[in-house]
Amino acid sequence: MSMLRDRMSKIQYTEKERNTRVRKNQFAAGKGGMAGYAKKSQPAKRMNDYLDLNDDALVRYPNPSIGVVVPTLMNPFFPKMLSGIAETARIQGYYTEVFNAAQDGGDWTNLAARFAQGRQQGLILAAPKVTEKIVRLLAETEPMPYVLTDQADDVPGALRVAVDDTTGGGLVVDHLVGLGHQRFAIVCPPQLPFNMAARYRGYLDALGRHGIPRNAVTYVSAPLTREAGQTAAARIVKLPGITAIITINDDLAIGVLKGLHELGKRIPHDYSVVGYDNTDLSNYVTPELTTVNQPVMDLGHAVADCLLAKIERREPAVPATLPVELVVRASSGRAKLA
Ligand code: RIB
């Protein structure tokens, strides 16, 4: 506790510094297209006041924060990644603020306007589509340190903390081919964000290595929700010969399990289903889901460490691609003989 206080006292800003930061971060009318925004901004002193409900006493103090842009909060992966980020940030005296890109309905200007409040010292970008626009906007105003991860689009030269998704995709296919499967459905959205594109490449590379012909693999398009997985199951059961279903994340897999169950299919007797993420839900479904574990808490810690190093002008220790592992559970089994 006292260490935290010591740390915070070092990073508190003087009133003048805070006001300067707010002014610098306001978008010039006509430049960032945010005319009128500057008028609405609050005095920095009030914006930097936080009530810390996790503290052992309720204390009000000025504290800097980092922002994290996620694509959704509906998938359990992101709250867990945020917990890792917040844990590391808090130890180092920073608060974590979450920006849910989905909530802004794709209107990135809303998101960007909120960064202009001057509260965040840096950003972690984990959502697709908004990345480039945010990065461009930040470059036009005061450059703010940022780190990319997970679904963020690629920005040449930017620092990224990544998980080894290509290997992860390969592990799924190796496992299923090892169980004798020869015909596959891959369930995923038509436009894949950065990390999932690597995962998908991993599936295809491994299928190629095992000599599985392209026409033995059917791509089933579905957005990243459990409902879409459930609907996809109805399409898959109409496809002849498929015995293995690969979904690009656990949420889709959980929906597929439910859909297959409703259609009277037995898992893994009729179909093997393999997800990706190892979210906390994956061993609470029946049958328990075979999946790929992503080190989500470690990812959160590592990405926050890198950002905080950049904010404090230290050399960030960017980790090598974080490792994944296959978690074999009851939803995968030997392929049914044709
Ligand atoms: O399930 C959520 C997915 O979105 C995960 O696979 C994670 O990598 C994120 O991109």
Image: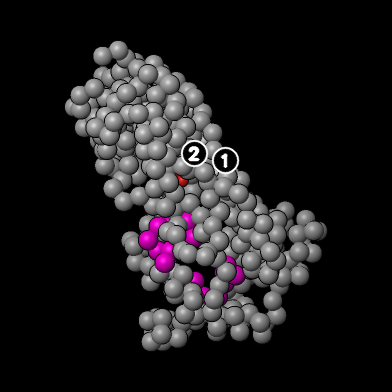
Q: CA distance from mark 1 to mark 2?
A: 8 Å
Secondary structure category for the residue under label 1: loop
Residue 252, above or below 123 = above
Residue 91, percent from left and from top: 70, 56
First in residue order: circle 1 vs circle 2:
2
Q: Which mark is residue 323?
A: 1
Question: Can you tell which quarter of the image residue 96 is in?
Answer: bottom right
The residue lying at 55 percent from left, 65 percent from top is 146
- 123 is within the stretch colored magenta: yes
The answer to whether residue 276 of the structure is visible from this angle is no
Residues shaded magenta: 115-132
Question: Can you tell which quarter of the image residue 34 is in?
Answer: bottom left
Asked if the beta carbon under badge 1 is closer than 8 A to the nearest atom of ligand 1, the reply is: no
Residue 322, above or below 113 = above
Q: Is residue 174 left or right of residue 49?
A: left
Question: Can you tell which quarter of the image residue 289 is in?
Answer: top left
Q: Which mark is residue 290?
A: none
Q: Residue furthest top?
A: 337
Secondary structure category for the residue under label 2: helix
Q: Is residue 302 left or right of residue 113?
A: right
Q: Which part of the image, by quadrant, shows the C terminus?
A: top left
Residue ID for mark 2: 167
Asked if the beta carbon under badge 2 is closer than 8 A to the nearest atom of ligand 1, the reply is: no
- 314 is within the stretch colored magenta: no
